[in-house]
Image (cartoon, helix red, strand yellow):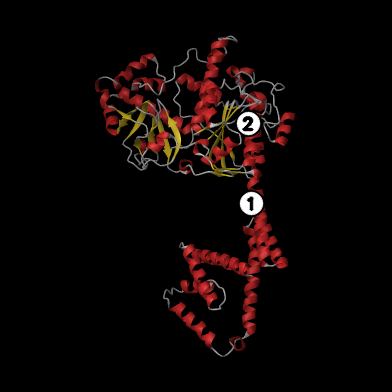
């Protein structure tokens, strides 16, 4: 009885506070109100009184009447004290039929409102929980009935959450600055409309035992590996990579990427649609080579989901020569994937990334590759794709009457080194892919009055270039080193919370920690690392053009990071040199197009 009264009074008091707050249109301090009720009940119990809560009707009546004086409470106190000391039994004087009729009316009104009228405001599962709780209270009492209702609500939540899809295919590009020819390779092969070799999926919420099977099914369908082999079914039953030896000898290999476009196979896109074929990743030729899972918005992954979903998916992808990558995982999810051998350990991860041979994956030891950001993961995929395409071109040459020469470049482009400082003309030529006849125009940035157009700034690792809410006085182009972009709206992964397993506190070296350059930064730069920009990247131009405060922070990620800053004064000076001004406008237009193609990012 005591526990039941505590539960009922606490629950009813919370509902009273919420109802009064809604009627007043103002937020109330729920903790302070509950403390008032609790202290009042303590004194009531010490004086042999009864438990109670707010007089809800009187509170709203006095509020709507505009009565703000404390005399209402004092008069109620004096009236109750007078009734307590009165020698006359008030129930004998008051008309009982009136009191009984009022209570009966209130009971039926509440019953009709919460069992009949509420049907139009609740989904079927929630209404079923309500009916089950009401029936249980009638048969087993209020305490057991409410407990039964809570259990039913938990079961309903698990089932509903498991049915909801937390998977979305998104359009993402890396923040890497490729040359014009390499960017064309990436777009035509990596992000082809019908046959993309790099696909990115965004996950949200919590992934647990109830939703892992649904998630695995959706991912298998989207990637094109839904049809399970006999070995896959055995693996799903055993749920352990050590007990099943999986081979891919019975599976056909994916075709070479050099000429994998449907246009080169005698079937154009219009013909595919005319024959009723959907441009989905169904058959083997339409499967991607890289699958990137963005876990930035995933809060929780339990052990069963780690092995039942992610481990199973990595094995299924490895058997089909698909590299599976996850990015943006918080500290807890990162540790969960590594501790269950779903992802590589920190010691072997860098070595695997460096030595992975194209997209050929060792089926026996295949695991998920983890990256700090989704843009870093996509840059890795694009780099491997470019290397494989260029390697294929160098080995095969001009085969099939030069058909592939129309797609593959004849000369390899040299990638920029982040350790070497490059001039602004060199970076702009690489970024824009200018022809030789236009190269002389860029000399204006390094000779004559070119110094007045921009200034070169050098930063050390951890130095704050600008922080959130600062005035935007220019935009930047990276000439050497790299820059970390921090999103202030996301601070969960930067916190690196303490992880406690069944064996105790997990050492921090067993899961990914905050980047070193972020640790050196001042407190003004807050947020998670959204991207790491390298040589040739342009940033800060959106806030600069819109003339608003910075919406993100930027930190130098390497020692001796050199930036070219173009301020408003430099832009005004450029107006006197139309050719140079046209180049800067082209740079901003190119950067804006890449920004729009990449979705909303800081």
Q: Residue at x 42, y 73 (%)?
A: 68
Q: Is residue 303 above or below residue 171?
A: below
The furthest residue to the bottom: 87
Q: Residue at x 65, y 23 (%)?
A: 285
* Residue 157 image label: 1
Q: Nearer the viewer, residue 334 or 190?
A: 334
Q: Is residue 182 above or below residue 311?
A: above
Residue 531 horizontal/vertical position (percent)? 45, 33
- How many angstroms separate mark 2 from mark 1 (CA)? 29 Å
Q: Could you say which quadrant of the image residue 208 lies in?
A: top right
* Residue 314 image label: 2
Q: Is residue 166 above or below residue 312?
A: below
Residue 458 horizontal/vertical position (percent)? 32, 29
Residue 151 appears left or right of 476: right
Q: Could you say which quadrant of the image residue 115 lies in?
A: bottom right
Q: Nearer the viewer, residue 352 or 290?
A: 352
């Amino acid at each position: 009885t005591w526990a039941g009264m505590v539960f009922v009074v606490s629950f009813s008091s919370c509902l009273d506070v919420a109802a009064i707050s809604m009627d007043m249109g103002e937020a109330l301090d729920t903790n302070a109100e509950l403390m008032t009720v609790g202290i009042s009940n303590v004194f009531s119990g010490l004086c042999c009184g009864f438990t109670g809560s707010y007089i809800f009707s009187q509170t709203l009546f006095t509020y709507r009447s505009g009565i703000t004086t404390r005399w209402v409470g004092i008069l109620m106190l004096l009236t109750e004290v007078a009734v307590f000391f009165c020698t006359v039994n008030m129930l004998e004087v008051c008309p009982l039929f009136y009191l009984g009729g009022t209570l009966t009316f209130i009971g039926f009104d509440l019953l009709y409102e919460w069992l009949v009228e509420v049907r139009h405001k609740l989904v079927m599962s929630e209404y079923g929980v309500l009916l089950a709780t009401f029936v249980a209270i009638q048969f087993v009492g209020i305490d057991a009935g409410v407990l039964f209702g809570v259990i039913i609500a938990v079961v309903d939540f698990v089932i509903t959450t498991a049915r909801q899809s937390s998977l979305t295919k998104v359009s993402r590009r890396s923040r890497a600055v490729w040359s014009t020819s390499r960017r064309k390779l990436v777009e035509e092969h990596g992000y082809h409309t019908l046959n993309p070799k790099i696909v990115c999926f965004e996950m949200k919420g919590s992934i647990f035992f109830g939703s892992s099977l649904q998630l695995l099914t959706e991912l298998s369908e989207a990637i094109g590996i839904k049809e399970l082999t006999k070995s896959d079914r055995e693996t799903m039953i055993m749920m352990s990579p050590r007990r099943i030896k999986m081979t891919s000898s019975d599976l056909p290999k994916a075709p070479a990427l050099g000429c994998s476009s449907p246009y080169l196979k005698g079937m154009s896109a219009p013909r595919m649609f005319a024959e009723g074929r959907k441009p989905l990743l169904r058959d083997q030729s339409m499967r991607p080579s890289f699958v990137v899972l963005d876990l930035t918005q995933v809060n929780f992954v339990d052990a069963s989901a780690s092995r039942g979903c992610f481990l199973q998916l990595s094995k299924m992808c490895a058997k089909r020569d698909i590299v599976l990558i996850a990015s943006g995982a918080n500290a807890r999810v990162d540790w969960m994937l590594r501790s269950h051998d779903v992802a590589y350990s920190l010691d072997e991860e860098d070595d695997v990334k460096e030595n992975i041979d194209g997209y050929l994956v060792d089926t026996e030891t295949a695991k998920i590759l983890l990256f700090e950001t989704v843009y870093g993961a996509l840059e890795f995929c694009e780099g491997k794709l470019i290397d494989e395409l260029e390697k294929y071109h160098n080995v095969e040459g001009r085969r099939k009457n030069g058909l592939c020469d129309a797609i593959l470049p004849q000369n390899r482009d040299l990638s920029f080194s982040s350790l070497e400082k490059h001039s602004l003309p060199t970076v702009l030529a690489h970024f824009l892919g200018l022809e030789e006849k236009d190269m002389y125009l860029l000399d204006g940035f390094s000779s004559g009055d070119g110094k007045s157009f921009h200034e070169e700034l050098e930063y050390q690792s951890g130095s704050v270039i600008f922080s959130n809410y600062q005035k935007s006085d220019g935009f930047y182009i990276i000439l050497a080193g790299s820059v970390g972009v921090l999103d202030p709206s996301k601070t969960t992964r930067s916190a690196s919370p303490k992880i406690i397993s069944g064996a105790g506190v997990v050492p921090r070296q067993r899961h990914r920690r905050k980047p070193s350059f972020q640790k050196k930064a001042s407190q003004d730069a807050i947020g998670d690392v959204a991207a790491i920009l390298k040589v040739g990247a342009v940033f800060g131009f959106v806030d600069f053009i819109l003339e608003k405060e910075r919406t993100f922070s930027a930190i130098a990620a390497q020692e001796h990071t050199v930036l070219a800053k173009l301020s408003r004064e430099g832009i005004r000076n450029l107006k006197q040199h139309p050719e140079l001004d046209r180049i800067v406008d082209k740079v901003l237009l190119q950067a804006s197009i890449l920004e729009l193609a990449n979705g909303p990012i800081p």
